Image (cartoon, rainbow, N blue to C red):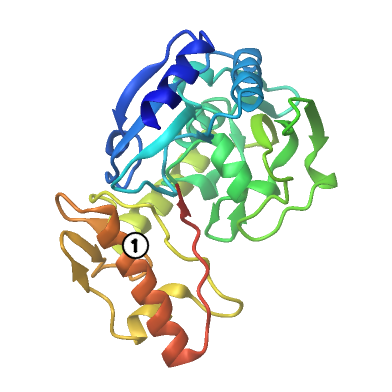
Amino acid sequence: MTADLRQRIMALGLAGLKWDIDLSRLCTMRVGGPALAVIRPGSVEEARTILALLSGAEIPWRVMGRGSNILAPDSGYHGVLVVMGLEMAAVEVSVDKAMIRVEAGCSLARLLHLAVDNGLGGLEFAAGIPGSVGGAVVMNAGSGGGCTADVLDRVEWLDSAGKMHKDQAGDMDFSYRAWGGEPGAVVMAASFALKPGDPAAIRADISVRLRCRGKTQPVAQPSFGSVFKNPPGDYAARLIEAAGLKGLNRGEAMISARHANFIVNCGRARAADVLWLIDTARARVAERFAVELETEVHLL
């Protein structure tokens, strides 16, 4: 089956394909087996062409950015991963309009630095959040009382038929860690409406946030970031810790002793061990507190 799929992919004539790439190199958790094929589009139009070809040939594919919320299985991914990375991270800054348009592959860290360098505030909540702009839009990433939707002006996305849409963010159905996009939709770029500010003051705010993260989160170890969404009126970390699971390990994967809503890779963790910890935390919290935890992490 793999040989047949490989031949079907090769028949598309896609330039830049790389074969049998270790997923642990593409995901921040640093686990996962080989992806059959990986391709990195160099532009929105190239991405559009690639996705149309893959869909038309009925070849399994998945779009990903920096892999900060993806658990890749030990068996790998038997299809094509379309990685939105530095090759698709063009940025347009309009200081007079306090607006930044950025392609999906740009990291949140780079976007934040560009904003600060141009005296534009509003993205401070993103300090220390791993991932790319595309993923931040789809997950409505946020922290410290702010989220991506708060500063979004427009989202450019492809539907499953390959049609490009350019929607005002206010017309979209953003909610907690969700953007409400239709199944199969892929974010290509986003525009952020920011506010002029003093760069020194913005940097000071970011520094405070980063120091807080460093004290409360296991930032020096490979992880997803938060594993579970916070349930209404409570915190996933509090529930997991109260269930006695802080520091629980399986193999070289562990529920962080610093922050219970993080699972960390202590060395050479396996995806199966990470998944066991996720399932155990969910089951124990449901048993103790009758709360069903929902993951932020997506299973590949």
Name the residue at 61% across, 25% down. 102
Answer few, some or many: residues within 10 Å of disc 1's Cα (few below 14, many 20 plus, some between 14 and 19): some
98 vs 48, nearest the viewer: 48
Q: Is residue 122 visible?
A: no
> Depth check: 266 or 106 in front?
266
Q: For mark 1, what is the residue?
A: 275
Q: Residue furthest right?
A: 171
Assign the N terminus to one quadrant of the image.
top left
Along the line of sight, the residue nearer the viewer: 275 or 143:
275
Q: Amino acid at mark 1?
A: Leu
Q: Please tell me how many numbered marks the rendered image carries.
A: 1
* Mark 1, secondary structure of its residue: helix
Residue at x 27% of width, y 76% of height:
246
- Picture quarter containing residue 165? top right
Residue 52 vs residue 159, the one in the foreground: 52
Q: Quadrant of residue 130?
A: top left
Whole-percent x, y for residue 299 in the image = 45, 52
At 68% from the left and 22% from the top, the residue drawn is 95
